[in-house]
Image (cartoon, rainbow, N blue to C red):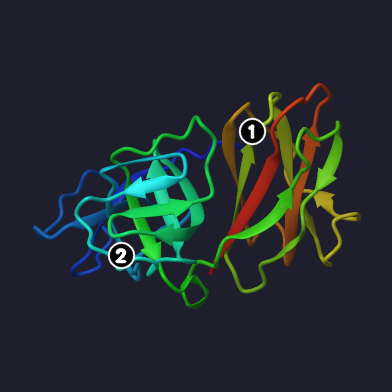
Amino acid sequence: MLGNITLNVCRICSTCEEFPTCEGKKLDHDEFGFELPNYPLPVFSDADDGGISSGGSTSSLVDNTKYWNPGVWVGALLIISIDKQIYFTNVVSNTGQTLFFTPFPSTVKIFQNNYILKRNPAAAVVSPVSNVFTSKVAPAAGTYYSTMVDFTGASHVLYQVINTCDQPINVQAIGNLTNNNATAGLIDGVMAVVPINGIVLVQIDLDDWTPFSGLQIVIPGGVTIGTVVANAITRS
């Protein structure tokens, strides 16, 4: 599945960890339930913390209801639901009520958004965030390839492509039986367009290709500023 993924929203009860249907079913409990997209990352009942942000910026998330110890979330996986899209990153520092992370593009606004935290993602159903491609500043026109991701034993790979260049770029999913992006084949036939200062999610399912997947990134001419960054997480 390529391009911007429109995600349905469900609620997970944080008490009984039930996962109601996406048809407006009400929670049976008064306790707070995480409101999260049900696809492609369906259940986060093992989240270590979460809530609804009070505010933030492109590089921070504020939750005025929290009283965290400074530094307790360094390295944790942070997943945010914004306008029915998933955004993910690793926390680089935190204070009592604020999480800091590598900046998203200026078009991503954090205000009252649902989020979760996983302190040890390597032991969870979701892997830590890994960088698979970072271009030079103002990259030259050309076709580039990400590092391949081995998702043996996983059901999905979710790529997050961040374009801060002053030109739109194109991305295409690729796959191979070996860890070799030079001989990889294309998965599906449509390239996703990542707009200027935009983010696009690219999901690859186990039945699309196994065991290695990656991205082909096509950068046009005329780029004068910005970079292209691709990160990935896998879900078992």
Where in the figure is residue 70, as x and y percent of width and height?
34, 65
Task: Pick whichever, 10 or 141, lies toward us.
Answer: 141
The label shown at residue 164 is 1
Q: Nearer the viewer, residue 4 or 18?
A: 4
Q: Is residue 61 left or right of residue 219?
A: left
| Of the pair 56 and 47, the residue shown nearer to us | 56
Q: At 63% across and 26% down in the image, what residue appears?
A: 196
Direction left: furthest residue: 30
Neighbor class of circle 2 (other Cα within 10 Å; few <14, some 14-19, many 20+) is: some
Q: Residue furthest top?
A: 222
Q: Is residue 42 above or below residue 201?
A: below
The residue shown at (24%, 65%) is 18
Does residue 66 appear left or right of residue 105 in this picture? left
Which quadrant of the view contains residue 212?
Answer: bottom right
Find residue 83 and report its horizontal and vertical position in percent.
39, 35
Q: Earlier in the sequence, mark 2 or mark 1?
A: 2
What whole-number distance in Å separates the C-alpha atoms at marks 2 and 1?
Answer: 30 Å
Identity, as a three-letter code, of the amino acid under mark 2:
Asp
> Label 1's element?
loop
Residue that badge 2 annotates: 49
- Residue 101, placed above or below residue 196: below
Seen as rendered, the residue at the extreme bottom is: 123
Q: Is residue 152 visible?
A: yes
Quick check: 196 left or right of 28? right
Element type at marker 2?
strand
Q: Amino acid at mark 1?
A: Thr
**Disc number for residue 10:** none
Residue 21 visible in the picture: no
